[in-house]
Image (tube, rainbow, N blue to C red):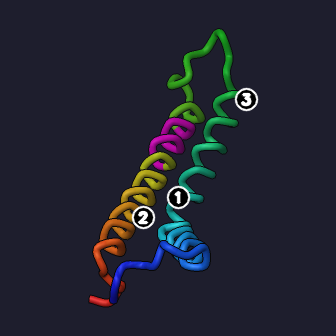
């Protein structure tokens, strides 16, 4: 299969829609976990206690690390898909 036709608005819309679906779960779950962890960080800040001195602090840190990891994996998968697709790969190998 040839690379997607990006010369027409319909082809651009179709490819944008196709690319939007690639690794969507990884990206959205990762960013959601980062947002929840950041909200938890803002709600639990105490000037007298260090963040990593409590189990909640470690949980927040783990949520940030895992969330950014998931989002990064989704971005890498989508980028690799785009590169292969532009080279003429049809998704069936």
In the displayed structure image, the side of residue 59 where residue 75 appears, left or right? left
Local SS, label 2? helix
Residue 91, position as x, y percentages in the image: 36, 84
User: Which residue is more in the foreground, 69 or 10?
Assistant: 10
The residue located at (46%, 49%) in the rendering is 66
Contact (Cβ within 8 Å) of mark 2 with mark 1: yes
Give the magenta-colored segment's residue range: 59-66
Our reading of the magenta stretch's main secondary structure is helix
69 in relation to 1, above or below: above
Residue 27: mark in rendering: 1
In the displayed structure image, the side of residue 76 where residue 7 appears, left or right? right
Local SS, label 1? helix
Q: CA distance from mark 3 to mark 1?
A: 24 Å
35 in relation to 44, above or below: below
Dot in front, 2 or 1 = 2
Contact (Cβ within 8 Å) of mark 3 with mark 1: no
Residue 43: mark in rendering: 3
Mark 1 Cα shell of 10 Å, populated few (<14), some (14-19), many (≥20):
many
Local SS, label 3? helix
The residue located at (28%, 74%) in the rendering is 87
Mark 2 Cα shell of 10 Å, populated few (<14), some (14-19), many (≥20):
many
Residue 78: mark in rendering: 2
Dot in front, 2 or 3 = 2
The residue located at (50%, 70%) in the rendering is 19
Asked if the stretch drawn in magenta spans residue 52, the answer is no
Quadrant for the N terminus in the image:
bottom left
The residue located at (44%, 60%) in the rendering is 74
């Amino acid at each position: 299969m040839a690379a997607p036709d990006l010369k027409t608005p319909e082809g651009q819309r179709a490819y944008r829609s196709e690319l939007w679906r690639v690794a969507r779960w990884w990206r959205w779950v990762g960013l959601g976990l980062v947002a929840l962890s950041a909200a938890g960080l803002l709600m639990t800040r105490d000037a007298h206690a260090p963040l990593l001195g409590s189990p909640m602090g470690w949980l927040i840190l783990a949520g940030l690390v895992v969330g950014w990891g998931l989002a990064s994996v989704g971005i890498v998968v989508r980028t690799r898909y785009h590169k292969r697709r532009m080279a003429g790969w049809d998704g069936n190998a």
